Image (cartoon, rainbow, N blue to C red):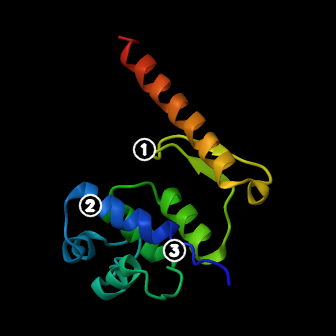
Amino acid sequence: MTEQRTDFADLVRQRRAELNISVRKLAEQSVDPETGEQAKFGWISKVERGESTDAPAATILRALAVGLSLPVRVLQEAAAAQYLNMESFIWSQDRTTRVLAARIEEMSDEERRQLADIAETFARRRTQSDGNSD
C-alpha cells in the first residue's frame, strides 16, 4: 500500500501556525481575489486533519494564497504533490528557493534532503548578499 502524501496539508497547517491564526480565521481571510469564493472552514479543517478531500480548485488555491500570505504557485505545487503525486521541485526550508530536480521520483529520501540543504544554503547566501548590497 502506498503511503498517503501530505505535502499540501502540512504546508497549510505549518503556515497557519506560523501566522498564529485559527482555522476559522484562515477561512475568513481566504477569499479568491478574482471570484470572491471563500475557502470553507470545514474543508480546511479536514485537510489539516489528513482526512480525505477532493483536490482544491484553482479558486480555493488563490483564496488560500491570500489567507496564508503565500505565492499561489507554492500552494499549487504542494497540492500537485499531495493529490496527483507530482513533484519536480525541492524547496529550501523557508520556501523562497527551489531546485528543479530531473528524475526526482528516482531519488532517495537522503538525496532529496541533500538537495533541500543545497537550496537552503543558497537562500541563506542570497539573503546575506542582499543585506550587504546597501
Crowd class of label 3 (few under 14; some 14 to 19; many from 20; radius 10 Å): few
Crowd class of label 1 (few under 14; some 14 to 19; many from 20; radius 10 Å): few
The answer to whether 69 appears left or right of 74 in the picture is left
Does any portion of residue 33 appear in the rendered image? no
Residue, disc 1: 94
Quadrant of image for the C terminus: top left
Q: What percent of the width, then of the height, locates residue 80?
A: 61, 69
Element on which disc 2 rests: helix
Residue, disc 3: 58
Q: Residue at x 32, y 72 (%)?
A: 31
Does any portion of residue 58 appear in the rendered image? yes
Q: What percent of the width, then of the height, locates residue 25?
A: 19, 72
The answer to whether 17 appears left or right of 81 in the picture is left
Residue, disc 2: 17
Element on which disc 1 rests: loop
Q: Amino acid at mark 3?
A: Ala
Which one is earlier in the sequence, the residue at label 1 or at label 3? 3
Element on which disc 3 rests: helix
Q: What percent of the width, then of the height, locates residue 21?
A: 19, 65
Q: Is residue 24 above or below residue 123?
A: below
Mark 2–mark 3 distance (CA, rounded to whole Å): 23 Å
Foreground: disc 1 or disc 3? 1
Which of the 4 image quarters holds residue 1?
A: bottom right
Which one is earlier in the sequence, the residue at label 2 or at label 3? 2
